[in-house]
Image: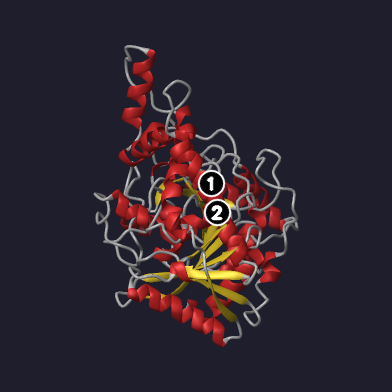
Amino acid sequence: MDIATLTVKEAARGLRAKDYSSVELTQAVLAAIRERDGALNAYLSVDAEGALRQAADADAARASGREGDLLGVPIAVKDLINVDGQPCTCASKILRGYTACYDATVSARLRQAGAVFAGRTNMDEFAMGSSTEASAFRTTRNPHDGTRVPGGSSGGSAAAVAGGEALAALGTDTGGSIRQPASFCGCVGLKPSYGRVSRYGVTAYASSLDQVGPMTKTVEDAATVLSCLAGRDPRDGTTPDVPVPDYGAALRGGLKGLRIGLPKEYYIAGTDPAVMACVRGAVEACAAAGAEVVEVSLPHTEYAIAVYYIVATAEASANLARFDGVRYGHRTANPESVFGLYAKSRAEGFGTEVKRRIILGTYVLSSGYYDAYYGRAQKVRTLIRRDYEAAFRSCDVLMTPVAPTAAYRIGEACDDPLKMYLGDIFTVPANLAGLCGLSVPCGKTPEGLPVGLQVLGPAFGECAVLRAGQGVEELVGAE
């Protein structure tokens, strides 16, 4: 078996047909990690013994008659999602040595489905970044060009899938952290609607924006993993009690008759011409296959970055206040006072980008600035959401670039955080509005770098997004 090309669906068929066992499949994944990860740095830790034990349990379950698309299939997990007994460092020194003592809901659902936890993937510290360079431990490299970033913050998950070290992985998306690395690395990345997947047991960055989703080699695999993750969770009050549709059936809808909206604010000067050519080529292929293409407008898009970096940092400053050196995580040596304990533990444990966002968030929430910044940002956020609601009255999905560029070189944006923040312009609005979004490969630049097409749907409109993504994949994804 070739782990580099093997999909989740193909692995499940092979396991059912007894072409190989889960133990053999897991051994092949572990071998691929040993062989390739020295160059990629996609993983922060690998639990080979635990994975093989889970694989043996899956083989025993299958021998007793149990079936399932994820039974015995190894999956990588971003290192801010708790898996009982495994590290959960959030790629931060402040949590170095911390071991999770319970399963996040998504981990529990994967475990119930019989999936095997292959390892913990690298990320920007506390999911704050767009390149995975903000990890406290290592810099992950793009599988297509080792001098370039894999994107972020789920760069380790994207690199593991695209680099042949995982069949699938979990990522999180607060402002594009699934879709952008999927675009940069040339894999599929699905951000579900806000509330579609439980966030219980997922270390919070910005609680009104965060969402967990799959990163896979195909749209079909993304639908398979989402079917396992989605649904109401009483431990997460943001998950509504709404039915989980048959995502696999949605893939069979085809493009004919699908209404595709092109937001004029996303097709702008400043986007790399090679990226735009790939995106427009995919849209034209969809139109040739019978989709209806219409222009729409999202007039408040220009405010999205400013709103996002007020709302996200404000919520981050509140969420990360719990890391104080008292209960768990890094604790400074010999503090002279309680204040010294807090201040030194956090100064020593947090990296530069995390400190920057905590300071910014604390500022916009402070007395005298709350209404001017945070309150006003929430009002504009409502306008952004209403723009989407109006657009979806005339189309089923939107198609846009994922990012203005393909993967850039390591170190290129480190000294200019604003430049990196502006790279999120096409992804953050969906998080502000609570929408679902998909990145699907739609071509490559002349340098051979992958380009992703973003497909956006209304809240809980994953079926339409997956249908469109499957169509794009069939038309141009393999080119």
Residue depicted at 25% across the width and 54% down the height = 411
Residue receiving disc 1 = 379
| CB atoms of marks 1 and 2 within 8 Å | yes
Direction from residue 156 to residue 459 in the image, left or right: right
Identify the mark at residue 457; answer none if there is no mark.
none
Q: Is residue 340 visible?
A: yes
The answer to whether residue 82 is above or below residue 156 is: above
Q: Secondary structure at mark 1?
A: helix
The answer to whether residue 122 is above or below residue 5 is: above
Residue 147's spot in the image, x, y percent?
26, 61
Cα distance, mark 1 to mark 2?
A: 7 Å
Residue 435's spot in the image, x, y percent?
58, 57
Residue occupying the far top of the picture: 336
Circle 1 packing at 10 Å, graded few (<14), some (14-19), many (20+), is: few
Q: 271 or 112: which is nearer to us?
A: 271
Q: Secondary structure at mark 2?
A: helix
- Quadrant position of residue 342: top left
Residue 222's spot in the image, x, y percent?
58, 63
Identify the mark at residue 383; answer none if there is no mark.
2
Residue depicted at 49% across the width and 49% down the height = 174
Q: 416 or 384: which is nearer to us?
A: 384
Q: What's the amino acid at mark 1? A: Lys
Residue 406's spot in the image, x, y percent?
35, 67
Q: Is residue 32 visible?
A: no
Residue depicted at 58% across the width and 77% down the height = 471
Q: Quadrant of the C terminus?
A: bottom left
Q: 202 or 239: which is nearer to us?
A: 239
Q: What's the amino acid at mark 2? A: Leu
